Image (tube, helix red, strand yellow):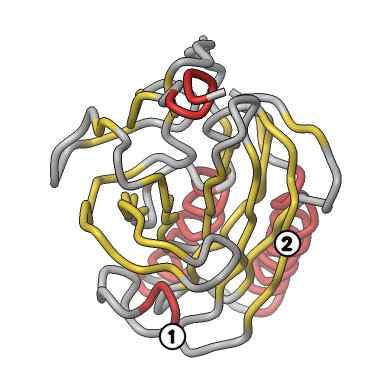
Amino acid sequence: MYIHKEGHKMLLWVGVAVLVVWAAMLFLVQPWNFFHYLFITILILFWMALLSFFRIPRRVFTEDETRLVSPADGKICAIEETFVKEYLNCDCIQVSVFMNGTDVHVNRYPVSGKVEYVKYHKGNYFVASYPKSSVLNEHSSIGMVLPNGQKILMRQVAGVMARRIVYYAHEGEEVKQNQEMGFIKFGSRVDLFLPKDTEILVDLQDVVRNGITPLAVVSDKKKSDE
């Protein structure tokens, strides 16, 4: 396990703050009582919770270009047909992964391809499991074309606690399956919008892991049409 780069500064500053408060209490508050010990314990536990949030466990990734692998840790909260105007402009299957505060929050590309579209959208901070949060909440949109010519769209969606979406995508960039796509701080969801005829391999409420759990089969339809 290691700590993601997005957490280095925050962990450093919070750790320094905890040490300063601890030192000040040692010199200024004597004797300590139960509440002083409780206060310091809460501060240390808070720093440890941050440490856990930014953890990146070492994993053996699923490398299979015939499958779309989960871009996030969490639970499947939506599998439904929807019309997507942005980038795709067609009917799609939406598969959404909800991440709670204890999940690993790095996001990865579910399949290799070329990034064609990147856009950041300001918005609200409704509960990420709310169906309309995909378009109403703050989110980033990343559209890519697969080697077979099909296109997919991914959205990193902010939630009630999430206040910063980090994405690493650049238009024109060639990306690899399981390469880091971004990071969402403090709980949210990732939406995938796939071709309507895509075979989905998961069900609602299934627990998935980024880089490991296959979500869908990559169709070869366009290749065969050629």
Secondary structure found at label 1: helix
**Residue 198 higher or lower than 159, as above or below:** above
Residue that protrudes farthest toward the left in the picture: 204
Q: Nearer the viewer, mark 1 or mark 2?
A: 2
Amino acid type for the residue under numbered disc 1:
Leu
Where is residue 42? Give x, y as percent. Answer: 43, 64
Question: What's the residue at 49%, 71% (across, down)?
Answer: 158
SS for tag 2? Answer: strand
100 to 178, vertically: above or below: below
Left or right: residue 69 versus residue 143 is: left
Q: In the rendering, at what x and y percent does residue 96 appear?
A: 33, 53
**Label 1 belongs to which residue?**
136
Depth check, front residue: 123 or 37 = 123
**Residue position marked by numbered label 2 in the rendering:** 118
Identify which residue, 56 or 69, lies in the foreground.
Answer: 69
Point 21% across, 52% down: residue = 79
